[in-house]
């Protein structure tokens, strides 16, 4: 026997090509099933989040309307009372109106930031990122 016979692949039972192809197809089926399960879970998550977001948004809008009605009434009373006190204290009209305008603009700015902060919490940011993640 020569040296080349010693380095050759040992003879014995070798798996058939059909078994390898079958195993490859089974693995592909498992992979496809895994992706189907992942997609259905993501769609389920998106539908549940949509339902919760609709409920949250409707509650947010309803409570915002109620709160804004109460706050608007109180704020009008506060502006009238503050203006009356400042006018009785002898403040000139231009200074009185300037202070009230600045105070109201400051409140508007704070309310705008608060509404934006609340609106950012209602949405699909996590669902969208989960659907399009790899």
Image (tube, grey):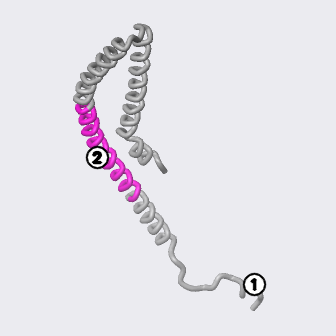
Q: Is 10 on the left-hand or right-hand side of 39? A: right
Write down the region rendered in magenta. Answer: 34-63
Q: Which residue is rendered at x = 75% and y = 92% of the image?
A: 1
> Which residue lies most toward the top here?
93
Residue 26 image offset from top left, x and y in percent: 42, 65
Vertical comparison of 111 with 101: above or below: below
State the residue in front, 106 or 54: 106
What is the distance, in whole Å, between disc 1 and disc 2 at their CAs? Answer: 67 Å
The quarter holding residue 72 reads: top left
Vertical comparison of 67 with 132: above or below: above
Residue 46 on the magenta span: yes
> Which residue lies most toward the front here?
89
State the residue in front, 90 or 128: 90
Tell me which secondary structure the magenta stretch mostly adopts: helix
Q: Which residue is rendered at x = 44% and y = 67% of the image?
A: 22
Q: Which residue is rendered at x = 36% and y = 36% of the image?
A: 118
Residue 4 tag number: 1
């Amino acid at each position: 026997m020569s040296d080349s016979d010693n380095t050759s692949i040992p003879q014995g039972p070798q798996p058939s090509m059909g078994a390898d192809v079958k195993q490859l197809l089974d693995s592909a089926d498992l992979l496809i099933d895994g992706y189907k399960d992942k997609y259905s879970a993501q769609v389920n998550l998106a539908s549940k989040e949509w339902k919760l977001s609709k409920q949250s948004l409707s509650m947010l809008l309803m409570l915002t309307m109620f709160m804004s009605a109460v706050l608007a009434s109180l704020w009008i009373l506060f502006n009238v009372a503050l203006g009356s006190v400042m006018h009785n204290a002898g403040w000139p009209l231009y200074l009185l109106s300037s202070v009230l305008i600045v105070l109201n603009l400051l409140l508007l700015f704070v309310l705008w930031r608060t509404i934006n902060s609340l609106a950012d919490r209602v949405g699909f940011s996590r669902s969208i990122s989960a659907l399009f993640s790899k």
